[in-house]
Structures are given as structure tokens and as C-alpha cells.
Image (cartoon, grey):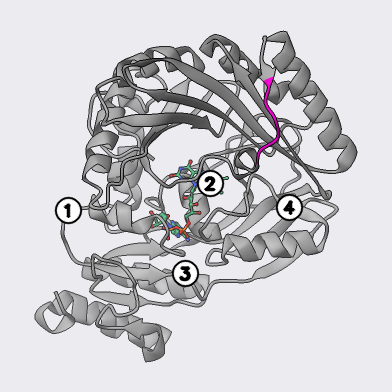
């Protein structure tokens, strides 16, 4: 619906154009690059400009969708019920403001492409922790979706950021207090990370760096039994310098046994650390009767997103039953990959070799996988109590549900409830 037919939208756009300037408002939604056209596109250039937009959105009851590079948005918007919304592009909140290589952090605007952040880190001999060069996206979009990272020093899954500035749905600007890494206590900002922006728009972040050396090595092991492959995947985090990326690949054509189990890991960093970690992970593989595989460029590339039908989170103990239950339940997957490994479990991804240009198989498969994972492991999926707590917080912060409505159905949901995976 265009502004002329919608007086609330018109008043909202007039208010926003007055505070941001006409140049930062496109009233016909042009330039969004999205299939589902927004009613308008806004390009704020500061946290205070974002604040003005959110305040006006609340007054005029206009839904606002934050956008980084838009790599994930099309799929999320497709799942959203039709309705008018305004796109808030974070493109002009870009830039690396400060780099502290000795303290291993850098500060960047939410709209900064991750590739630019990585280049800034590499210029001082570091790398953005948890980031692989092929990943698309912006700082804000990444943090909006990433719940945690394997910490390069501790190996455990840790928050992806050290600090944040964000704008709450009321328009209030909040920033985390600078504290030492060793500080402890509840983190009031945790709800802003990994929740798709439903509790506020991130405008700036302090991101973790890891020391980067020139060495890159890969390791691939073949296991005869799933249990051994899972034990290896749990154990790699015991290394003092965990792999940059580790994945389990389960290749199977359903109905044809046996499947093959492969563990694939990429190590990057200083030569001595990489060699020590490679030795540790290789030795662990040997103890679990894993057979080393010859070097291949495929190990370095990892599983690419092409052909992914569905993904969700799984605990190691449920992987065997999940593989059994996937048979016949989801399309014809030829490969299941578990990545983003932690001592608890990881992200289960189901791939097909068959093309699915309309995305029909994909959306059915995602629903099937969500249901399957909720049945197999209600605890790993968000519990009803967690969903209710998030719902109360959402109502308190954003009573009309105007901020990032496309991400709300993707949040934690009660067991058995259907919804898109994250
Ligand atoms: C280490 C790592 C871990 C990852 N973990 C996950 C994961 O756990 N789950 C997953 O699905 N993807 C994950 N990703 C993928 C990630 O979502 C995409 O790679 C990409 O970074 C998204 O960025 P974008 O700018 O294209 O986001 P967009 O497609 O523009 O937006 C994606 C979502 O974030 C919201 N958003 C965008 N900008 C902001 C902002 N400034 N403030 C608040 N919300 C905002 C949007 O409204 C939308 O809901 C991970 C990526 C990496 C590198």
C-alpha cells in the first residue's frame, strides 16, 4: 500500500523525512532488492536517527524491518503474513571505528559488511572470531541471527559480542558498559543477539578477534560408526586451540545402506598452534578408530549452503534417532551435515542434490524437520516457559509487535508448535 492510500504511513514518512532529510527516505520502496516490496525504504545514518524512526513507528503504528545486506531477509519475509512494512536499511551505519589488536576486539557499525570487518582485522594480523570468509552479511544481521560462537581461546560456546549499542522499540538508545572480559553477572543485552532483531535494532557492536597466523590446514577422517564420529566432534573442543571450523558429514542415499560418516575440520592461525591442534584432533580420531582421508579442496570449502533443505539444532545423543527418522520424512536428502559444533551438539543441516527452484520442497522440509526435532528433543528446542518469557518481554518492549515482525515467528516456540528453524 502506498503512502497516499494510507494516512498513518503518510504521517510516519513525513515525520521521518523531517528528521532524517528527504534524501534518506524512498517513498516507493524502490531499492530494497526484495521480492516482497516494502512500502518505503529508510537509510538512517546514526543511532539517534534510528531512534527517531522507531519512535515515529510507534506513534503511527508502522511495522519496521531492519536490513543489513539482506542475505537472510527474503526467506524470512516469505514466511511473514502479508502486511505493510517499512525497510530500515543499516547500510549507512557502516564503518570500523576502532581496532584493538592487543585486546583482541574491534568496534564496527551495524551496517558494516562482515567482509570489510574481516579485512580490517587482517590488517592488524587478526581475524574476526568465528567468521569464515565466504559468509555473507553485515555485523547487525549476523548478530541478529548468531546465538553464540565457539570461543577461539576457551573452546566453549560464548556470546558472539563483547558489547553492543542498540535502539529499543520505544526509541531508547542503550549501550553496554565497557567491562573487562573477566567480568561476570547477568548480561542484559543477551536478548538482543540471536533473536532476529525482535527486541531492538543493533547500531554498533564490539566484536571479538582471534590472533591470525598464515597457516591453514585441514583434517578429514572417516568413521565406521556414528557414535565414534560424535565422540570426536564433542572432543575437538578439548583442544587448547580448537579448529576454525569443524563439521560432520553424513552421506546417505535413503534406502541404501550403509551411510558414511566423515569429520572435516579446518585449522587456521599461527603455525605452532595449528600444528598442535591438528595433532591433537588427529590423535583423538585415531583413538576412536577414525581413518585419515587424503587432502582435498572440499575439506577447506566445507558444506556450502547450496541445496540446503532445512536446518535446526540437535544434541549429540539425538543425532542417531534423527538420522533414522529423517528416512522418508524429508524429500530425498543425500547429505546431512552437523556444523557449528559444541560439546552439546550442533546445527543439523539437510541437503538435497535435486534442484528446488521454487523453494517448495524446502519450506515443507523445514516444517518437517522442526516437528521432528521438537518430538525428539523438546528441551533443546525452546521450551514453552522460555517462549512465554520471550513473549512477555516482546509485549513489554514492543506492545504492537512493530519491530522486525518477520523474525518473531522464528523465535523460540512451544514444543510441537510449527515454525521456521533459525
Ligand atoms: C559465525 C556465524 C554464526 C552464524 N549463526 C547463525 C545462526 O545461529 N542462525 C542463522 O540463521 N544464521 C546464522 N549465521 C548466518 C547469518 O545470519 C548470515 O550469514 C548473515 O550474517 C546475515 O546478515 P545480513 O546482513 O545479510 O542479514 P539480513 O538478511 O539483512 O537480516 C537477517 C535478520 O537480522 C535482522 N537484522 C538485520 N540487521 C539488524 C540490526 N542491525 N539489528 C537487529 N536486527 C537486524 C533482520 O531484520 C533479519 O531478521 C551465522 C553466520 C556466522 C558467520
350 displayed left or right of 248:
left
Any part of residue 174 in sight: no
The mark closer to the camera, 3 or 2, is 3
Question: Which stretch did the figure color magenta?
Answer: 292-296
Could you give the CA–CA distance between mark 3 and mark 4, rounded to whole angstroms? 23 Å
Instruction: Tell me if residue 322 comes above or below residue 352 in the rendering.
Output: above
Q: Any mark on residue 81, and which?
A: 1
The mark closer to the camera, 1 or 2, is 1
- Tag 2 and tag 4, C-beta contact below 8 Å: no
Rendered location of residue 294, percent (x, y): 70, 30
394 displayed left or right of 36:
right
Q: First in sequence: mark 3 or mark 1?
A: 1
Badge 3 residue CB within 8 Å of ligand 1: yes
Q: First in sequence: mark 3 or mark 4?
A: 3
Residue under label 2: 189
Rendered location of residue 252, percent (x, y): 41, 23
Q: First in sequence: mark 1 or mark 2?
A: 1
Residue under label 3: 90
Could you give the CA–CA distance between mark 3 and mark 1, rounded to whole angstroms? 23 Å
Magenta highlight on residue 389: no
Q: Identify the image quadrant of the N terminus.
A: bottom left
Q: Secondary structure at mark 3?
A: loop
Q: 227 and 100: which one is in front?
A: 227
Q: Main secondary structure of the magenta part?
A: loop
Residue under label 4: 127
Q: First in sequence: mark 3 or mark 2?
A: 3
68 displayed left or right of 54:
right
Any part of residue 344 in sight: yes
Which image quarter: residue 246? Answer: top right
Q: Secondary structure at mark 2?
A: loop
The mark closer to the camera, 3 or 4, is 4
Which image quarter: residue 393? Answer: top left
Amino acid at each position: 500500500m502506498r503512502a497516499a492510500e494510507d494516512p498513518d504511513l503518510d504521517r510516519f514518512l513525513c515525520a521521518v523525512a523531517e528528521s532524517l532529510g528527504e534524501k534518506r527516505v524512498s517513498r516507493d520502496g524502490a531499492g530494497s532488492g526484495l521480492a516482497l516490496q516494502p512500502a518505503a525504504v529508510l537509510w538512517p545514518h546514526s543511532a539517534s536517527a534510528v531512534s527517531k524512526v522507531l519512535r515515529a513507528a510507534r506513534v503511527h503504528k508502522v511495522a519496521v524491518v531492519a536490513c543489513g545486506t539482506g542475505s537472510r531477509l527474503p526467506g524470512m519475509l516469505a514466511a511473514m503474513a502479508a502486511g505493510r512494512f517499512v525497510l530500515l536499511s543499516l547500510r549507512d551505519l557502516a564503518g570500523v571505528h576502532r581496532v584493538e589488536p592487543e585486546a583482541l576486539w574491534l568496534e564496527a557499525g551495524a551496517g558494516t559488511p562482515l567482509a570489510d570487518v574481516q579485512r580490517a582485522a587482517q590488517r592488524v594480523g587478526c581475524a574476526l572470531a568465528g567468521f569464515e570468509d565466504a559468509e555473507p552479511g553485515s555485523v547487525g544481521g549476523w548478530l541478529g541471527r548468531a546465538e553464540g560462537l565457539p570461543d577461539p581461546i576457551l573452546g566453549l560456546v560464548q556470546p558472539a559480542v563483547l558489547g553492543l549499542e542498540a535502539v529499543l522499540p520505544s526509541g531508547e538508545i542503550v549501550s553496554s558498559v565497557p567491562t573487562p572480559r573477566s567480568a561476570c553477572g547477568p548480561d542484559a543485552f543477551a536478548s538482543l543477539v540471536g533473536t532476529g532483531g525482535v527486541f531492538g535494532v543493533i547500531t554498533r557492536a564490539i566484536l571479538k578477534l582471534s590472533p591470525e597466523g598464515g597457516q591453514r590446514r585441514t583434517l578429514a577422517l572417516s568413521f565406521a560408526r556414528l557414535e565414534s564420529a560424535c565422540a570426536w566432534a564433542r572432543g575437538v573442543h578439548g583442544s587448547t586451540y580448537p579448529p576454525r571450523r569443524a563439521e560432520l558429514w553424513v552421506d546417505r542415499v535413503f534406502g541404501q545402506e550403509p551411510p558414511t560418516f566423515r569429520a572435516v575440520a579446518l585449522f587456521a592461525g599461527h603455525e605452532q598452534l595449528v600444528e598442535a591442534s591438528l595433532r591433537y584432533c588427529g590423535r583423538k580420531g585415531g583413538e576412536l578408530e577414525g581413518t585419515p582421508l587424503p587432502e582435498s579442496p572440499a575439506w577447506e570449502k566445507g558444506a556450502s549452503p547450496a541445496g540446503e533443505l532445512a536446518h535446526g539444532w540437535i544434541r549429540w545423543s539425538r543425532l542417531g534417532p534423527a538420522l533414522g527418522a529423517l528416512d522418508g520424512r524429508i524429500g530425498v536428502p543425500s547429505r546431512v551435515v552437523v556444523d557449528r559444533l559444541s560439546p552439546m551438539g550442533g546445527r543439523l543441516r539437510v541437503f538435497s542434490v535435486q534442484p528446488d527452484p521454487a523453494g517448495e520442497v524446502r519450506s515443507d522440509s523445514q516444517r518437517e524437520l522442526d516437528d521432528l526435532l521438537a518430538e525428539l528433543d523438546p528441551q533443546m528446542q525452546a521450551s514453552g516457559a522460555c517462549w512465554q518469557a520471550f513473549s512477555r518481554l516482546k509485549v513489554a518492549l514492543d506492545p504492537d509487535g512493530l519491530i522486525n515482525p518477520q523474525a518473531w515467528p522464528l523465535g523460540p516456540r512451544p514444543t510441537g508448535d510449527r515454525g521456521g528453524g533459525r
